[in-house]
Amino acid sequence: MVHGLDGRRALVTGAGTGIGAAIARALAKAGARVAVTDMDGKRARAIAAAIGKRTVALTLDVTDAAATRRALAKAAKALGGLDTVCANAGVSTMNRVVDLTEAEWDFNMDVNAKGVFLTNQAAVRHFLANGTKGVIVNTASMAGHMGAPFLAHYCASKFAVVGFTQSLAKEVGGHGIRVNAVCPGFVRTLMQERELVWEGTLRGMTPEAVRAEMISLTPLGRIEEPEDVADLVVFLASDGARFMTGQAINVTGGARMD
């Protein structure tokens, strides 16, 4: 099957909840063996256990370069190789720029941008060392294509992911390594639940009103589910996307169209 992943070995960061967990489940369903990694090892183990015996769970802080290299090496050893890496780990906070702290800026940039860099770097080094025509899929955001109030620091980190993805794709394409990004919209996750409260507080609205506005901005008329993103990741990891690289693909229900 052109979209099947039988025989593939994949690692997913930030896979303890939300989009990352959905990606890990979808990759496994498509036939891949999966390393589920998360800063919260307990969550990673729970997702791996739910998926089944074709998985391994690892605790990973993606802002730690040495730990990231070790995690990829452990995953490759446990899975019998590694050919697909999904750099999904991400965080968010919300604040007006005039009130934004350096700590908030650094937190978002360290996980969302530096974490993608370190995960991609470790993946490429592994692929090159093993002669693997690997696949990398980074989780960006529609906030990597457009600014948003109260999310300047988050948007900056996701714009960085898009630019990094395009640059790396040009560097490693000659080795048969493909690098793409997915750009989700308003996704139903624990992160979104926190953001509904934060944005509501900043705008003097209820969380329910903020959610209703999100739906009104989405032509397909609903909140996005993590599985909507995960299915696209499976496609990008498959031979169906064999001639796609350097792309930052919106999966937003139409909330962002360019």
Image (cartoon, helix red, strand yellow):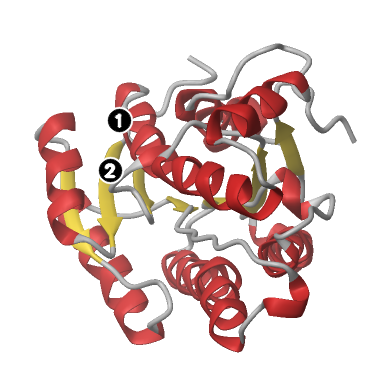
Rounded to the nearest angstrom, the CA distance separating label 1 from label 2 is 6 Å
Q: Which residue is mark 1?
A: 28
Mark 1: amino acid: Ala
Query: Residue reaching furthest right?
Result: 258
Q: Nearer the viewer, residue 245 or 129?
A: 245
Query: Could one spot residue 245 in this view of the protein?
Result: no
Residue 183 falls left or right of residue 4: right
> Residue at image x 22%, y 61%?
40
Residue 10 rendering spot, x and y as whole percentages: 36, 46
For residue 142, above or below residue 51 = below
- Viewer-closest of 132 and 85: 85
Q: Residue at x 86, y 30 (%)?
A: 257
Sequence-wise, which precedes: disc 1 or disc 2? 1
The one of 231 and 225 positioned closer to us in this rendering: 225
Circle number at residue 34: 2
Q: Residues within 10 Å of mark 2 (few under 14, many from 20)?
A: many
The answer to whether 134 appears left or right of 143 in the picture is: left
Residue 9, how many percent across, how many down? 33, 45
Residue 69 seen in render? yes
At x 40%, y 72%, the residue is 62
In this rendering, is residue 220 above or below 56?
A: above
Q: Is residue 187 left or right of residue 23?
A: right
Secondary structure beneath dot 2 equals strand
The answer to whether the residue labelled 1 contacts the one labelled 2, judged by CB atoms less than 8 Å apart, is yes
Disc 2 residue type (three-letter): Val
Residue 193: x %, y % from top left: 45, 40
Front-lying residue, 98 or 172? 98
Q: Secondary structure at mark 1?
A: helix
